[in-house]
Image (cartoon, coloured by chain):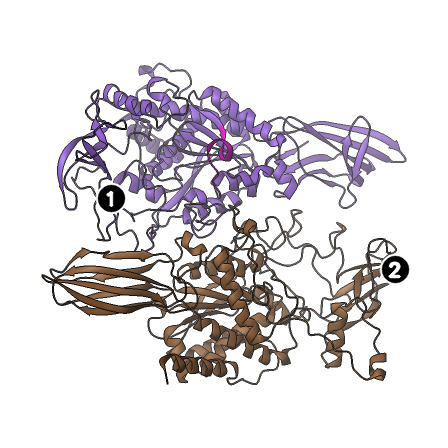
Chain colours: A brown, B purple
Amino acid sequence: MSKKAGARLLITTLLVTLAYGFSQAQDDYRSSQQITTQLQSLSRQYASVAKLQSIGKTDGGKDIWVLTLGSGDIDNHPAIVVAGGVDGRYIVSTELALKFAERLMASSQTDSVKNLLATTTFYVLPNVNPEASDQFFASLKYARTGNGRATDDDRDGQNGEDGYEDLNGDGLVTMIRVEDATGEWKKSEADDRIMVKAADGETGGYLYFAEGTDNDKDGAFNEDGAGGINFNSSLTWDFPYFQPGAGDFPVADKENRAVLDFLFERWNVFALVTFGSSDNLNAPIKYNAGEASKRVLKGMLKTDADANALVSKSYADIVGKKEGAQSVVQGGGFMEWGYFHYARYSFGTPAWSWPEFKMPEDSAAKAKYTPNKDKNKEVDYLRWAEANNHDLFVEWKAVNHPDFPGKKVEVGSWKPFAPYNPPFSLVADISAKQNKFIAKLATMKPQVKIENLTTDAVGKGMTRITADIFNAGTLATMTELAQKTRWVRMTKVEMVLSGSQQIISGDKVKLISSIEGGDKVTMSWLVKGSGSVKLSAGSAQTGIDTKTITLK
Amino acid sequence: MKRILYTFIILLAGLSVSAQTPDQIFKAAGSPPNPKVQVSWNRYYTSEGLWAIAKKLSEAHPNLVKVETIGKTYEGRDMIALTITDFSKGNVDRKPGMYVDGNIHSNEIQGGEFAMYTAWYLAESWYYNDFIKDLLADKVFYIVPTINPDARNDYMKGVNTANTPRSGMMPIDDDRDGLVDEDGYDDLNGDGEVTMMRRKNPNGRYIIDPTDPRQMIEVEAGEPGEYEMLGYEGKDNDGDGEVNEDRVGGYYDPNRDWGWNWQPEYIQRGAHKYPFSVPENRNVMEFVMKHPNIGGAQSFHNSGGMILRGPGAEEDRGTYNSTDDKVYDAIGELGESIMPGYTYMVVWKDLYTAFGGELDWFHGCRGIFTFTNELYHPYFMFGKDYKGGRRGDEVQKDMYKFEKNLLMTDAFVDWKEFDHPELGKIEIGGFRKNFGRDNPGFLLENDAHRNMAFLIFHAFHTPKLVIEKVEEKDLGGGLKQVTATIANKRLIPTHSSHDTKNKIIRPDYISLEGANVVAGMVVTDVDMNKTTEQKVAPAKIAVENIPGMEAVTVRWIVSGSGKYTVKVDSEKGGVVTR
């Protein structure tokens, strides 16, 4: 078997192993406490390849964990960050990051994974905003993005004065609809449980907003509840100033500082995979010359957009193509920061989207459904959920609302978190595909190797050394953007001499900013002296190759 | 009592070593005649030196000066802030505040002395100057003399030029080779200075200036030269073929680290990791966030005689409107008139675009009216206006003349031969680092005083709220209308336009206390009786702004009779009642 074919087999084995490793009995999403316990147990059980560290605590005393997976000189192996919890509503994101670590560890004795861990480092940050996601487990459940910090979301000088109220006493914050002639909402024709915005020139008849009262009587409902800073709108790129959840300025809180401080010290990171609301995997960010040439950069640079397209294609090959997908980019977001300000290859995906409902073929069964003429996605999702026995919806029920005396007010709609997260029974399958993708991304890592090393005797004790500094990986040694920043290191080629050895021609130290995947830089030296010299090439994010060369 | 008196005598005895007795002194106009704390304002002080002055001031003027620690620097030094006000008058936290700092760029040291001179002058003048007495009754000054104390000391004591370090002391890998601070300047000849290197070379492009042999001048095209210039004193410490390419304290810029329109290093050179990733700035930010009463701010840099205001970036033009511009212009133009040599400028338009600057954060995130002064100007040498050509040939030549005739050649290291490990026989010489950007000793106090006068004018114009009129009108049926007019007697509004637009600082509250309020409203047009009712909590009317030199009118409908109080509560305008 050729070397290449061998490597290919190893990779295939790896993808299969990672996708379908062991799974533990688990029937629902896990709280930050359960996650902590699991991380601690992983780091104990797989101590030789898994290190757990807390990089900071939230105001509420919850740890921000990083699980580092890898063996050998982990600081100088190309690394992938796997992050979850950046958007607190997407609790599945934490589960996916954690499941990646669990599967990798469960297979860590296989040759393929052992080899992967010996050449690649993974920094797994399952939940960077536990204060938000833990609202899933609170007595009043609602999809929350803010951390524990008291903030003034509506900028009226008071913090948290108008949060949600559980009007129907079911422990869930859903929606209310109010019969009101001035309302802009109406019931969907396909399913009157789903509310849609009335078109221009059409009367609605309903007010429609989140469950609660106008506590501060300012005319707005639930506009300033508990918390907090939304990790995924608090970072530096295109920061949404003065918007709820952003904070007074970028990176204003403990969670985001802890994560950024940690990552700025990790020179070996070449790529990030973030599960959450941002998406450039189902559809890549398209190159836009105008956006990419603004002084304050708004779009990806050309070669980086090409790399995004390439990786996005691999993603589609593994998880399936999502028709009509558009990339989702958000100001202040983490995936966005990973590229625009951290200058690494950065990828984001929600990993799941509302499944399509297939109308039954049988005409009697079909007759139960009003045709969904508007192709309303909510209607479709609700039909799918009910057909598959997933209880995701609270039926509308009339309540008395103090702000609307004498009016018909109902509480109902989606259970909190249902719009953002798959029913838990689907998670195992989703996770298997995402794991496979991360393993595939690892195979694309930049790898600097010294190839085609030759030595020629030039005479009079002089040797000419020639070598190709070759990037054996698919991705460049750094992004095009990174060539402009100091936060990614150059590929350093260094000829180390000893004794009376002397370089007659050539660079003792040469810094190369970027080598594209499959490209090389040919170098040569004229060295005077005898014995051997040492040539090293690479950087933390490409790995460092070293060769000892005997002088002629 | 006896012990207090004894302590006082000891204290006096200690001070009198350098102080004069009162009968030996004739007062010069505008200066404290016999200050309790004697400071020489013709020299520079290390960070510890500044701290020592601050401590002396707080001990000598306990009712006027308090010193506190606001956090630690990268190297673990305490950063200190002085609070200067009349502590016996009013609630200090609620007085309109003026924030002052200096030396954010560590080599731009005189900001430290200028800020400290301000503290010293305010405290020492309070005893005899009624203007200062009233000012300190109304206002509070927060002064952080150096916000970059680690590198201030490094500039003074380390191996540096006049331009280094500009940053703090966090180690940075400038050449991206994985090593930090491995190749800085070298004081090759051991004279305590980093000057220039030159080498005789018939193919060089420089000759010795015939009018002053110390100066090197570039020859005209087509003329032969005699010397080549080899840059600042140094060698290739790490053997990578580059000289001085990764020095201590380089390169990040603490003035590109602030949280308004922060941009990363590839857009804004000098930016660090994210806003306030420079610990010294973080301390200042936290201090300012804790003092929402700050309405004006001043920072001191060098050099070039500029009175700078935002926006720092062209992209932020929309964050200043004409109402704000008028306030800035009034203060800036006064500055030009009282500081000869200084020009009032807008950063992005008249200088260059810089993202993430300190003044932009004060304005953009806190709504504070802020100036940055670039201290010292070649104008000070001979009163010549170089028409912006501060680095031009004429300035260069005049610097040699000035240094020779007024500084008695104190600021130049004469060229001397040196055997360089890589460059062979060279010569080393040039201006010392304390010349060019730092005020020479005899020009320090003059410039400090003028800049202080500028910031005092600015502080004077932070809001001063007055309840001018409270009028009653009987509406019959037991109802009464109470109308109050609240004026702001100064230039600066309680909320800048950018603040009002984005609701940065909470509204001003005008309350009627002690009355049974039935309804409350803002009177938008007094003559035409137009009002906007506040339906919720009408006793406490929220007003989005009280503009400078203007007034707002509010009205309540009350039932019953009895005494009541009108109370104005403004973050930046303070609290007044009537």
Locate residue B424, reporting x and y percent: 13, 42
Report which quarter residue B128 is drawn in.
top left
Residue B122 part of the magenta-drawn span: no
Closest to the observer, A495 or A52:
A495
- Residue B351 painted magenta: yes
Residue B14 visible to the viewer: yes
Q: Could you tell whether A386 is left or right of B100 in the image?
A: right
Q: Specify the amino acid type for callout 1.
A: Tyr
What segment carries the magenta color? B345-355
Mark identifier at residue A407: 2
Image quarter hosting the C terminus of chain A = bottom left
Dot 1: chain letter: B
Viewer-side label of 2, 1: 1
Residue at image coords 17%, 31%: B415
Farthest residue to the left: give it: A460
Residue B86 in view: no
- Mark identifier at residue A159: none
Amino acid identity at mark 2: Lys
Residue A198 lies, in percent from the top left, at 82, 58
Q: Secondary structure at mark 1?
A: loop
**Where B305 sits versus A31, above or below?**
above
Q: Are there few (<14), some (14-19), or many (20+) residues within 10 Å of tag 2? A: some
Nearer to us in this view, B559 or B284: B284
The label shown at residue B185 is 1
Q: Residue B572 is drawn in which quadrant?
A: top right
